[in-house]
Image (spheres, grey):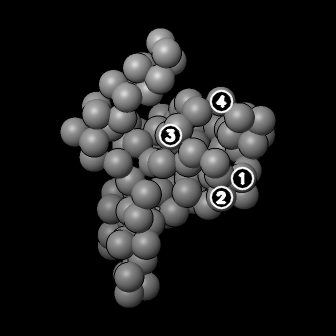
Amino acid sequence: MTEDTKRALEIIQPIAKELNINVSADGHCLYCNGQAIGIACNSTYATLNEFLGYAMLWMFLRNPGRWRGLPSGFEKQVKEYWIDSETLKKWRKAWEEEDHD
């Protein structure tokens, strides 16, 4: 995990706890409630942005009646770096192979 990711997690974890979002990270991804979000080579700021986008979408989906609606294109933009489970499995296998070389 990079120093930027460590700094981002220090900021994210207290917010995530209050929002009941389970958050963790490794050298490649931020994990929010199990959803992998690509953060390789991200700055602290970029990782925070990925979390905040996830958190806003998560809050809307949990209680859509509380919000007037999402801005057009918001969900697509938030999900831009989300990684589906099959892709994540393939990536993890490749990462393991890199680590053993």
Residue in view at x 28 percent, y 34 percent: 90
Q: Look at the numbered disc 3 and give the secondary structure of its residue.
A: strand
Q: Which dot marks residue 1?
A: 4
Q: CA distance from mark 4 to mark 2?
A: 15 Å
Extreme-bottom residue of the structure: 72
Q: CA distance from mark 1 to mark 2?
A: 5 Å
Q: CA distance from mark 4 to mark 1?
A: 12 Å
- Return the disc, 4 or 2, that comes first in the chain's sequence: 4
Q: x, y percentage for residue 35? A: 37, 43
Residue in view at x 36 percent, y 35 percent: 91
Mark 2 residue type: Ala
Mark 4 residue type: Met
Q: Mark 1 touching mark 2, by CB under 8 A?
A: yes
Q: Which dot marks residue 29?
A: 3
Q: Would you call the spot at circle 1 few (<14 residues within 10 Å), some (14-19), or many (20 or more)?
A: some
Q: Would you call the spot at circle 3 few (<14 residues within 10 Å), some (14-19), or many (20 or more)?
A: many
Q: CA distance from mark 1 to mark 3?
A: 13 Å
Mark 1 residue type: Ser
Q: Which dot marks residue 43?
A: 1
- Return the disc, 3 or 2, that comes first in the chain's sequence: 3
Q: Would you call the spot at circle 4 few (<14 residues within 10 Å), some (14-19), or many (20 or more)?
A: few
